[in-house]
Amino acid sequence: MADDCTDRDDGDSQEDEDLADSIWEEFAQRWEDQFRRLSEAEDEQLRRISEKVSNLAVQGAAAYDRRIGAAISDSDSVARQLSRVTGEVVEAERRHAVEEVTFEAERARREAVN
C-alpha cells in the first residue's frame, strides 16, 4: 500500500512535470511570438522613419537646388544690369571724348584763323 502512494505520487509528479513543461513551452512560444511582433513593429517604425528622413533629404536637396537656381538667376540678372550700366558708361565716355576732340578741333581752327 505504501508503494501505491509512491506510485501515485510519482504519477502525479510526472503529470505535474508534464504540465509544467507544457506551460513553459506555451510561455516560451508566446514570448517568442510577442518578441517577433515587437521586432516587426520596430522594423516598421524604423522603415517609416528612414523613409521620412529620405524624403526630407530629397526635399532639402530640391529646396537647395531651387535656392541655387534662384541665386544663379539673380546673379545673371545682376550681371546683365552691370553689363548694361558698363555699356552706358563706355558710351558716355566715348561721347565725352568725341565732344573733347570736337571742342579742341574748333578751338584750334579758331586760333589758326585768328
Image (cartoon, helix red, strand yellow):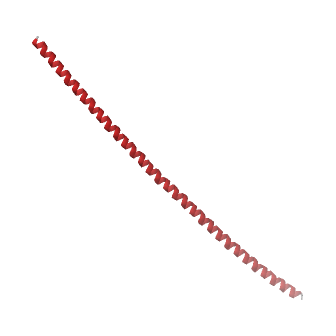
Give the vertical position of 14 relative to 60 (above or below): below
Q: Is residue 87 left or right of residue 40?
A: left
Of the pair 78 and 42, the residue shown nearer to us: 78
Q: Residue at x 62, y 68 (%)?
A: 37
Question: Which quadrant is the C terminus positioned in?
Answer: top left
Give the vertical position of 33 relative to 75 (above or below): below
Instruction: Tell me residue 89's x, y (percent).
Output: 27, 29
Of the pair 35 and 44, the residue shown nearer to us: 44
Instruction: Tell me residue 90's x, y (percent).
Output: 25, 30
Instruction: Tell me residue 19's x, y (percent).
Output: 76, 79
Q: Residue at x 29, y 35 (%)?
A: 84
Instruction: Tell me residue 48's x, y (percent).
Output: 54, 60
Report which quarter residue 93 is drawn in.
Answer: top left
Question: Which quadrant is the N terminus positioned in?
Answer: bottom right
Q: Is residue 1 left or right of residue 34?
A: right
Looking at this view, name the residue that lies furthest to the right. Answer: 1
Circle count: 0
Q: Is residue 47 left or right of residue 105?
A: right
Q: Residue at x 78, y 79 (%)?
A: 16
Looking at this view, name the residue that lies furthest to the bottom. Answer: 1
Looking at this view, name the residue that lies furthest to the left. Answer: 113
Q: Is residue 42 left or right of residue 15?
A: left
Q: Residue at x 25, y 27 (%)?
A: 92
